[in-house]
Image (cartoon, grey):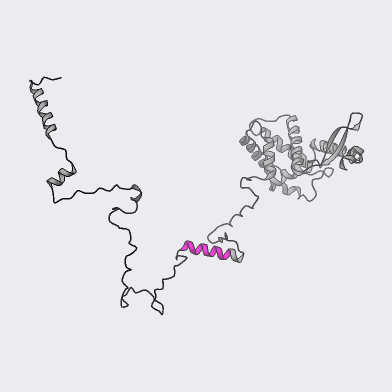
């Protein structure tokens, strides 16, 4: 603590005395000093009323006992329409404003009421026709033909879809540039197929016709122990189109892998697969033998459809 005899101590004493002798600024003292000025009554500011007006004291709430405004004279240019009794008639409110958005909405409603297509935008200013809208159960991600998509997924190895798509592109290009095949009369294609000279013009039809022609119609299913004595009972059953194509592609892939590789490069596998497709159309492929074998087994197993083990299950 500083000594009071020093200059610093004397200054501290004087400062303390001045503070102690100062009177507090109370509302009564302020009123005594300025009698003509009344103390201002502070009202707390409500933040919830901030958005109603800039100054909350500038607008007063309407008084219920206040008189209505005086009527407007009749000679005024802003006179409102009145009825015969002199009562005020309000102007009807316009439901739709005159803009182009409401006009389009009204036109769409009129088309829907008339049973027309509300999305008919017309063909004005278009070089080509408008694309058809997808149906209710159609999907936009169906980019490729079902046969192309299925064969591409069967060609895929180790999840490399882009590599399988490149193989499919090379296969279709090979079928497009190869000479027209010579169909064997012993192994004809599907009935109603186009002339062989027209197949290279449509490689997708070329591929689909080859796969569907060699695909088996039935498959043989075995029931273990149904024939008695622990022997299996073979039963033929029809196959769906997608399952038939899958089995045919697997047979073609097996024949391609057994072939001796010719050439090198990334187009080697695609070229061998396309050559096997051409061999299927011409009737030179070994896939036809596997198809005939399955059909022979199915024909021989038709007698088992009347077996008591099968007929009893159907009952």
Name of the residue lying farthest toward the bottom: 84
- In the rendered view, tell whether residue 104 sits above or below residue 10: below
The residue located at (90%, 40%) in the rendering is: 312
Tell me if residue 181 can be seen. Answer: no
Magenta residues, start to end: 97-111
Q: Which secondary structure is most common in the magenta stretch?
A: helix
Of the pair 57 and 117, the residue shown nearer to us:
57
Residue 147 sits in which quadrant? top right
- In the rendered view, tell whether residue 292 sits above or below residue 127: above
Of the pair 81 and 288, the residue shown nearer to us:
81
The residue located at (69%, 48%) in the rendering is: 201
Asked if residue 280 lies left or right of residue 81, the reply is right
The question of residue 99 being in magenta is answered with yes
Asked if residue 251 lies left or right of residue 12, the reply is right
Quadrant into which the C terminus falls: top right
Residue 4 sits in which quadrant? top left
- In the rendered view, tell whether residue 17 sits above or below residue 110: above
List x then y, in percent, for residue 198. Answer: 72, 49
The residue located at (34%, 47%) in the rendering is: 47
List x then y, in percent, for residue 83. Answer: 41, 77
- In the rendered view, tell whether residue 183 sits above or below residue 95: above
Residue 129 sits in which quadrant? bottom right
Of the pair 170 and 35, the residue shown nearer to us:
35
The residue located at (10%, 26%) in the rendering is: 13
Tally of numbered discs: 0
The question of residue 285 being in magenta is answered with no
């Amino acid at each position: 603590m500083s000594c009071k005899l020093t200059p610093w101590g004397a200054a501290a004493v004087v400062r303390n005395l001045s503070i102690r002798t100062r009177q507090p600024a109370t509302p009564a003292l302020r009123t005594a000093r300025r009698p003509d000025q009344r103390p201002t009554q502070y009202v707390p500011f409500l933040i919830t009323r901030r958005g109603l007006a800039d100054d909350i004291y500038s607008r007063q709430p309407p008084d219920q006992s206040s008189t209505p405004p005086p009527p407007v004279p009749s000679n005024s240019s802003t006179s409102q329409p009145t009825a015969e009794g002199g009562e005020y008639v309000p102007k009807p409110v316009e439901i739709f404003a005159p803009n182009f958005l409401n006009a389009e909405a009204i036109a769409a409603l009129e088309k829907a009421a008339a049973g027309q297509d509300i999305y008919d935008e017309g063909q004005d200013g278009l070089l080509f026709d408008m694309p058809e809208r997808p149906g209710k159960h159609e999907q936009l991600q169906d980019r490729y033909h079902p046969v192309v998509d299925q064969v591409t997924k069967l060609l895929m190895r180790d999840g490399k879809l882009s590599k399988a798509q490149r193989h499919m592109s090379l296969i279709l290009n090979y079928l497009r540039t190869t000479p027209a095949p010579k169909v064997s009369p012993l192994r004809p294609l599907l009935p109603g197929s186009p002339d062989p000279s027209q197949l290279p013009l449509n490689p997708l039809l070329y591929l689909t016709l080859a796969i569907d022609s060699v695909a088996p119609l039935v498959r043989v299913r075995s029931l273990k122990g149904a024939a008695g004595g622990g022997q299996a009972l073979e039963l033929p059953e029809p196959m769906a189109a997608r399952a038939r194509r899958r089995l045919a592609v697997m047979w073609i892939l097996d024949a391609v892998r057994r072939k001796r590789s010719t050439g090198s490069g990334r187009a080697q596998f695609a070229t061998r697969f396309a050559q096997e497709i051409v061999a299927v159309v011409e009737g030179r492929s070994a896939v036809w033998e596997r198809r005939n074998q399955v059909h022979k087994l199915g024909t021989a197993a038709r007698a088992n459809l009347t077996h008591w083990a099968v007929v009893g299950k159907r009952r």
